[in-house]
């Protein structure tokens, strides 16, 4: 109805008024239709960009005074043709058939205009964008001294290095102490890693006098930028300082230079300076503990991912802050080494640094069942060190054993014992496999005059405590999910002392122990108690020796 009335008024208008009416409508487009003006400009630019040659020819003809001839065919659809009328007067553009845009987040008119113009206009030459990604070279990549020096981080590194070389340098480069200080301040490296890098850049073991050797500036910059370390994290820098060339992982021997620097430069280990044998055993034990904690798969190849995810960097930084080596519980504590070494020495009756089944069965006053000892020597949890005599366990394998036995809350320990109990190797521990180990445990409980816990009752208790995903089937994932309670699962099967201690636990004593050893892991608690016991025994022996000497006088 309203359309008919409007049409009648237009028909009754004077001749020529319809054109003026359309002009007024066009003038009112920006106010009534905010998108229309932008669309008209857009279509005009689109038409202009598609017919630049024609427009240029017409302009040249006008300037030259030549007659202008209109094209015989239309050059394109008019901006106001029916095919584009909807595009002008519609409040939102039509949706794409392939993608429906949410009506609550439409593109703004300016963005719609720019997106259309970007696809229709002829683009000029692209602007030169400076490189912003600098891929790190691979381990086998051949890099020269000038590679990556254009990287902003590398330029900043070179400038800071130049400052230290200008202020602290001597003819030829930097001395050891100045080099270590610079690497701590500029590169955020632990001092022990800096000492290791200094020795490496000076020639490694061939260096006669490290304190008087120097590292040239160009040699350091070539090494640092060649491995892409200017913008790397401190963990990546430390890993690269330890990693040999043409190798993307760390082996046991690759950490040996680091431990030599710890033994030589940390004040808490000065008392070992005259005992080379204990220095070697200390370094060996620390490296075994590092691989035990970080290299959980036991491959013997420590990758950067494992290095970064572990807590070795925290322990290395702690060496710079703490002069008492025994307060650094992770890896470097001398008391922890002393406990491990003395435990091994007590079991090794012939002192050939090898243990057999009978030796290991005497561990902790025969706490382990024979069936689990057999599984260990079958190399079920991990392969023994290569070239170890058949039926023997070396010191490295004993370190893995004692760390797993005394702290069953770690992932490495759970994996170690899971492989022992999983007889068929299918990744699931079932009641029949548990019974195979518990039968001997039950006989030993009866021999100790302890009230035996029947297997059915034990199975129900463990099932309620661990709540496996599938009834009657315990997986490694179930055990890792229920730490630290999962450690009792294995103690109940083959570790007699720990199982009896749990059955006869005193809640009041447990609270007192938790308060005394707050913040310590099971291994830390064990090492602290055992070190106190061993130290007390040594004191008693010394006192007894002194009394015998007095009697002899």
Image: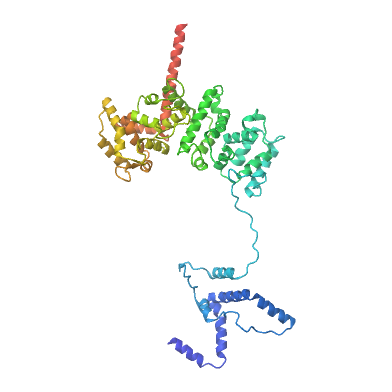
Specify the quadrant of the image occupied by residue 357. top left
Against 470, is 15 above or below?
Answer: below
Spot the residue most to the right: 64
Against 83, is 348 above or below?
Answer: above
- Residue 376 is left or right of residue 108, and the answer is left
Coloring scheme used: rainbow
Measured as percent of width and height from the top left, residue 200 is found at: 62, 35
Specify the quadrant of the image occupied by residue 483. top left
- Residue 119 is left or right of residue 497, and the answer is right
Measured as percent of width and height from the top left, residue 244 is found at: 58, 38
Residue at the image point whose x is 48% and y is 31% from the top: 386
Residue at the image point whose x is 56% and y is 25% from the top: 270
Residue 448 visible (yes or no): no
Residue 211 visible (yes or no): yes
Measured as percent of width and height from the top left, residue 224 is found at: 63, 42
Q: Quadrant of the N terminus?
A: bottom left
For the residue pair 388 and 294, the one nearer the viewer reads as: 388
How many numbered tags mark residues here? 0
- Residue 371 is left or right of residue 313, and the answer is left
Specify the quadrant of the image occupied by residue 177. top right
Spot the residue most to the top: 553
Measured as percent of width and height from the top left, residue 15 is found at: 56, 93
- Residue 516 is left or right of residue 218, and the answer is left
């Amino acid at each position: 109805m309203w359309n008919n009335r409007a049409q009648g008024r237009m028909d009754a208008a004077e001749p020529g008024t319809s054109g003026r009416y359309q002009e007024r409508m066009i003038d009112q487009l920006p106010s009534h239709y905010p998108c229309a003006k932008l669309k008209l400009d857009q279509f005009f630019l689109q038409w202009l960009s598609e017919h630049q040659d024609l427009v240029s020819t017409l302009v040249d003809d006008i300037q030259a005074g030549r007659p202008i001839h209109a094209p015989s065919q239309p050059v394109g659809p008019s901006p106001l043709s029916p095919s584009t009328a909807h595009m002008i007067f519609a409040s939102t553009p039509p949706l794409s058939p392939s993608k429906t845009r949410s009506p609550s987040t439409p593109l703004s008119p300016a963005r719609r205009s720019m997106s259309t113009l970007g696809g229709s206009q002829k683009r000029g030459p692209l602007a030169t964008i400076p490189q912003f990604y600098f891929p790190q070279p691979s381990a086998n990549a051949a890099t020269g001294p000038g590679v990556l020096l254009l990287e902003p981080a590398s330029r900043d590194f070179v400038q800071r290095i130049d400052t230290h070389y200008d202020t602290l340098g001597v003819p030829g480069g930097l001395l050891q102490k100045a080099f270590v200080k610079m690497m701590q301040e500029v590169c955020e490296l632990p001092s022990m890693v800096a000492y290791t890098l200094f020795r490496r850049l000076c020639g490694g073991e061939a260096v006669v006098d490290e304190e008087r050797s120097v590292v040239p500036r160009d040699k350091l910059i070539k090494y640092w930028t060649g491995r892409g370390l200017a913008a790397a994290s401190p963990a990546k820098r430390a890993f690269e300082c330890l990693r040999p060339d043409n190798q993307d992982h760390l082996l046991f021997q690759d950490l040996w230079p680091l431990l030599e620097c710890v033994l030589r430069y940390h004040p808490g280990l000065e008392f070992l300076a005259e005992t080379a044998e204990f220095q070697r055993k200390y370094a060996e034990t620390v490296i075994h503990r590092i691989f035990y904690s970080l290299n959980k798969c036991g491959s013997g190849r420590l990758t950067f991912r494992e290095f970064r995810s572990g807590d070795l960097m925290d322990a290395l930084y702690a060496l710079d802050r703490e002069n008492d080596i025994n307060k650094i519980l992770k890896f470097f504590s001398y008391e922890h080494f002393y406990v491990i070494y003395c435990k091994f020495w007590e079991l090794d009756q012939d002192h050939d640094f090898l243990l057999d089944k009978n030796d290991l069965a005497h561990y902790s006053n025969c706490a382990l069942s024979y069936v689990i000892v057999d599984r260990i020597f079958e190399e079920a949890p991990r392969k023994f060190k290569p070239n170890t005599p058949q039926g023997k366990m070396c010191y490295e394998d004993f370190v893995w054993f004692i760390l797993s036995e005394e702290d069953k809350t770690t992932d490495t320990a759970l994996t170690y014992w899971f492989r022992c109990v999983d007889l068929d190797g299918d990744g699931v521990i079932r009641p029949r496999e548990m019974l195979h180990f518990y039968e001997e445990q039950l006989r030993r409980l009866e021999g100790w005059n302890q009230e035996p816990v029947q297997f059915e009752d034990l199975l129900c208790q463990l099932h309620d405590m661990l709540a496996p995903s599938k009834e009657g089937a315990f997986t490694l994932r179930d055990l890792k999910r229920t730490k630290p309670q999962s450690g009792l699962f294995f103690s109940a099967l083959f570790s007699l002392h720990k199982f009896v201690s749990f059955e006869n636990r005193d809640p009041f004593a447990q609270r007192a122990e938790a308060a005394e050893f707050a913040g310590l892991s099971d291994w830390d608690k064990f090492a602290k108690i055992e070190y106190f016991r061993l130290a007390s025994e040594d004191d008693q022996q010394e006192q007894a020796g002194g009394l015998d000497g007095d009697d002899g006088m």
